[in-house]
Image (cartoon, rainbow, N blue to C red):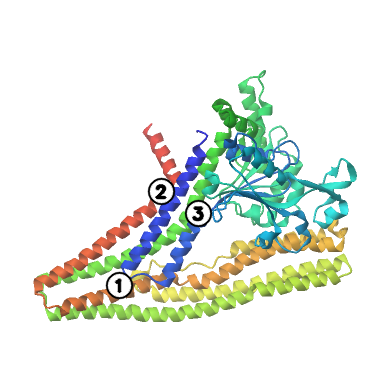
Amino acid sequence: MSTGSLSHQVEAYYGWKKNLIRELARYQDWLQSNELYSDDIASRLQRGIKLLKEDELTLAFVGEYSRGKTELINALFFSEFGQRMLPSQAGRTTMCPTEIFYDRASGKNYLTLLPIETRKEESTLAQLDKQPERWTTIELDISSPETMKSSLDEVAKTHSVSIEEAKSLGFHEDMLDHDPNNRNMVIIPAWRHAKISMQNPLLERGLRILDTPGLNALGSEPELTISMIPSAHAVIFLLSADTGVTASDLTIWQDYITTDNADHSAGRFAVLNKIDVLWDDLQGEEYVQQSIKKVQEYTADHLSMAVEDVLPLSAKQALIGKVKGDQALYEKSALPQLETLISERILAEKERLITKTLLNDILGMLQNSQAILSARMQSLSEQLEEYQDKGVSKELMKDLTEKTQKDYDFYYKKLITLRSSRRLMKSQGEILQSLISEERLEEQIRNTRERMKDSWTTIGMNREMGKLFDFIDHDLNNLASEARLAEKMVLSIYKRYTEDTRAQHLHPKPFSTAKHVRALRELKSKADSFRRDPRNIMTEQTLLIKRFFDTLVGEARLIHNRILHESTTWPDEALLPIMQYTLEQKQLLEHQIRRIKALSRSNKDAKAQREQLKAMINDNQKQLMIAESIQRHFRKPAPVQLQQKVVNIAGLAG
């Protein structure tokens, strides 16, 4: 694989999404020209276009200090600058979480930093993200690598503070380094969070990198471990080939990566960095490869993962090879294997998710439209055949009008009934939302905080922590009970509707909160462990309250919001398939009636009327051909899938 293959694959992925956006716009035009457009369909298509335009692929690089995370990011994405752009030297360089992306909205290159002192506030990172005035912003000059590197060095800046000050900022004393110039002081990062926007082909195409600090800072920034790492599409876990899996490595893996609420839909992969320390000119290449394989198998066993998901490489040698144009060194560094993994495994999963969440939905809508047009065309063809046998007469035109009107009345009444059912679902949705409203949760959180402040004993505070999670659990039980009733109601609506055999392929979207409910139940177990932790018994009250609300309550809020989102969107979308089907049937029949009436009113002879009827059939056929063309484009394999098919075919041919 060449050094540019990852760029080519990301470019192909971006091009595939652009084509999908173009086909969605084409489908929208097709619906409008066939009078099949509606507000519901418009909102679904707009959501799809937005999803494709804003889609990002987030890779989180996680690991203990000095494992080479930043060096690997430099090798993968910044080698064209001819030097290390991100601070990457021995010791603790990445002291604060750093996001690397391209701000497509502003089109600017910049570094923006959030002061560590903001940790003393109750504001979350998400809230502070909306307050640009709180951040320090430095413009980046990408035309001058030296100037840019100097600006980026700011990310690694630190402060020397008292132990009391560090504690007030949420750091654990035993996880901080002492200032070598003053043993009474400790070293903390100057910044809480850093964001780098930089024009780069991969970043421009929606790739987003999350560079994380080591174990002590991981535990100190709740949102990093609650939402940012768990929601990354893939995690690249860095280890050192000369040490294997250490105790602190295992702590990060178990506490922050393989958690129940983590998504990581594109996978978790371990990188054994620094394999160049195992390169041994005296022992020979075979010995080196055996040593690397041994560490690889040991790592896979300790992390309970497949051996092929553990990649030995040397980020340092890869960067040197790329910068100096030394292809042999680049190949020996084994970085190409990681680039292959990113392009073939991680991008393939993103393609699968887009296909699952968007394309299958759009294809279902398109197939409905095609089925309706096909049925109408068949009906017209039957009528034309009858006219050719019997000749066109007023009686036959009247029969056709009456039959079409009867079908129209059927779907018109169905639509009225469905609109009534939808109003009922809206009311049901309001009940679901009231059971898990944000206001209700926030009021309980405020009350819990006040009662914990007023409590004089650890036992009293622990009791209040437990009560908060019992309250959430009670709400979830009520929600589940009400949701079951709502789902039964939806199923009965579909059952009545699909007595029309043509609509038996329609199915409702299920109410899916099970994953989030499991995550909250798991969080309750974490809260129980937190309450029993001996370290917390010895912690000062104010710090204990802050730690509890920053971590456990913060995580509960995020999961609660996901359940609330589902409770808000599901009632609107549960009846959409039959609503769309019915509306399209009604609109097509309405269009058909107008054309038949115009045909019957015309003074043309029988032959001319038959020709006009043929023209209607031909028009339908053209519209079906356009729909089939759109469908073929939607069904085209995504780039990685296509590449894998070509490889398989080539393998078979060989």
Query: Can you tell which mark lies on residue 588?
Result: 1
Find residue 266 and report its horizontal and vertical position in percent.
56, 49
Q: Residues within 10 Å of mark 1 (few under 14, many from 20)?
A: some
Find residue 204 and report its horizontal and vertical position in percent.
53, 48
Query: Can you tell which mark lies on residue 353?
Result: 3
Give me the C-alpha separation between circle 2 and circle 3. 13 Å
Q: Quadrant of residue 179?
A: top right
Secondary element at tag 1: helix
Secondary element at tag 2: loop
Q: Amino acid at mark 1?
A: Leu
Residue with the mark numbered 2:
637
Residue at the spot 69% in from the left edge and 50% down from the top edge: 97
Find residue 44 and report its horizontal and vertical position in percent.
45, 66
Give me the C-alpha separation between circle 3 and circle 1. 33 Å
Residue at the spot 38% in from the left edge and 72% down from the top edge: 498
User: 592 and 163: which one is in front?
Assistant: 163
Find residue 396 and report its horizontal and vertical position in percent.
15, 78
Q: Residues within 10 Å of mark 2 (few under 14, many from 20)?
A: some
Q: Quadrant of residue 542?
A: bottom right
Residue at the spot 63% in from the left edge and 64% down from the top edge: 517
Q: Amino acid at mark 2?
A: Pro
- Residue 307 visible at all: no
